[in-house]
Amino acid sequence: MSGATAILKSGATLAIIATICTALVAATYTQTTDRIAANEKTLLEQSLQPALANTFYDSSVSESRLVLDPPHGLPGTEAAIIYRVYSGDEPVAALFVVTARDGFAGPIRILLGVNIDGIVTGVRILQHRETPGYGDKIDARKSDWVHQFASRSLQDPPVARWKIQSDGGEFDQLTGASVTPRAVIKAIHETLLYFEAHRDNIFAATATDEES
Amino acid sequence: MTRRRLRERLLTGIWYDNPGLVQLLGLCPLLAVTTTFVNGLGLGAATLLVLTLSNGLVSASRRWIRNEIRIPIYVLIIASLVTCVELIFKAWFPSLDRSLGIFIPLIVTNCAIVARAEVFASRNSVSASIVDGIDMGAGFALLLMAIGAFRELVGNASILSGFDMLTGNDAFTGLSFADHGLLLAILPPGAFFSLALAVAAKNAFDRKRRRARNTGATRSLRRSG
């Protein structure tokens, strides 16, 4: 067998095996894709739940997603996400995923739940790179710092007191870290202001499709 | 294959030539995921599945694969199988998949699998290769489970934690004996210590048995003499 035929033959074998393997993967993919999407949805709903304490709702939260591209008036320079929460047809709450840009080390991704009356139902930090042992106490797994925002609103405390205590505000600070809590509190406050100003628009908008 | 040979065959992978204990292959996933029994079981089962299927496919195609391109073809077959297994885990065991994380796709790089394709499946019949895959896979999986159980017991004072990841309901989520264990066992160094203990224990057991057999043999010799 000459060199050229040998190479052609090898190439053909490789091509055939590659086709078979691709077919195998494609078949598995089509068989599993629906289940995987359903699993991811359940996971998302579960991860949103902590920000909806004491809220009764029966809607599928992830289906009512709104993605707002910047500039959107919410904290952060990347896309913000809003999930609308309903009980029957009545809107009961909204979940915001926003970013505080002025943290100590990179963006802090915040999940904030607000009920229809503008009262905070829960706050969770989704992503951050704050200093371990200091700023990272904003994480609910590290300390209960974020729990102090539950059931607060724009009126409670009044605007001038939406600060950490050392700045003359109402909220606990973290020992050794003041930049981080300042950034989080500012983002929460801005989001509450946004919700108050745009509440009706938020619930009237049509949901953003998946994969957008 | 006779029963006796089958038994011998199975013991090869599980004991005499265990991919983890004796060949010391695939140590990266072995050391990384064995923080709990359930993790070990999950990765062990996935590896067993991939190893069995890849052995079967490599063996089935061994006659018309030219020697020069065999390695890329093994890689192709193994990578596709791993992708399929990963999708299956994502669909049916989502929380286990999250717990094992990157180590499911990294089964591709488990040298135990390429090694079996090269030294066994490419030279033996399909049925023998499948048996070899099950056998070696079981050896690897059993070792993962043993080390996982050991580290979980010592490091976390619990066993079968995360069992709900397999069943999907919260009926049984594992047993816990104390609040704290010896944390070291869960941390990366604990993985090395545990594997070292397992290898040492196996060697000690083998030596003891060999010695017992030797003295037994001499005794019977004396009697007959």
Image: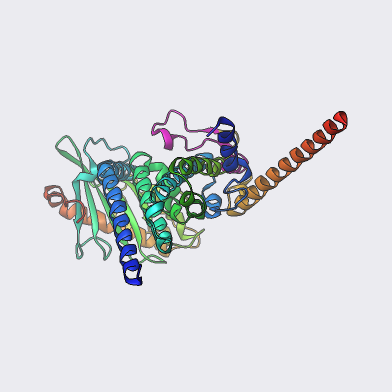
Residue A170 visible in the snapshot: no
Going 43% across and 36% down the picture, which residue do you hit?
Answer: B166
Task: Please identify the quarter of the rendering in which residue A192 is found.
Answer: bottom left
The residue closer to the viewer here, B142 or A21, is: A21
Measuring from the top left, give residue A63's x and y in whole percent: 20, 44
Residue B33 visible in the snapshot: yes
Quarter of the picture containing the N terminus of chain A is: bottom left
Q: Is residue B155 magenta?
A: yes
Q: Answer with left or right where residue B191 lies relative to residue A159.
A: right
The number of callouts visible is 0
Measuring from the top left, give residue B101's x and y in whole percent: 42, 50
The residue closer to the viewer here, A105 or A157, is: A105
Question: In the displayed image of the protein, which residue is found farthest to the bottom?
Answer: A3
Question: In the figure, A207 relative to A186: above or below?
Answer: above
Going 31% across and 37% down the picture, which residue do you hit?
Answer: A54
Question: In the displayed image of the protein, which residue is found farthest to the front?
Answer: A1
Quarter of the picture containing the C terminus of chain A is: bottom left
Question: In the figure, B143 relative to A107: above or below?
Answer: above
Q: Is residue A39 magenta?
A: no
Measuring from the top left, give residue B32's x and y in whole percent: 53, 52
The residue closer to the viewer here, A116 or B187, is: B187
Task: Please identify the quarter of the rendering in which residue A57 is found.
Answer: top left
Q: Answer with left or right where residue A145 lies relative to residue B119.
A: left
Measuring from the top left, give residue A197's x and y in whole percent: 17, 55
Question: In the figure, B184 relative to A167: above or below?
Answer: above
The magenta stretch spans which residues?
B147-175
Colour scheme of the rendered structure:
rainbow
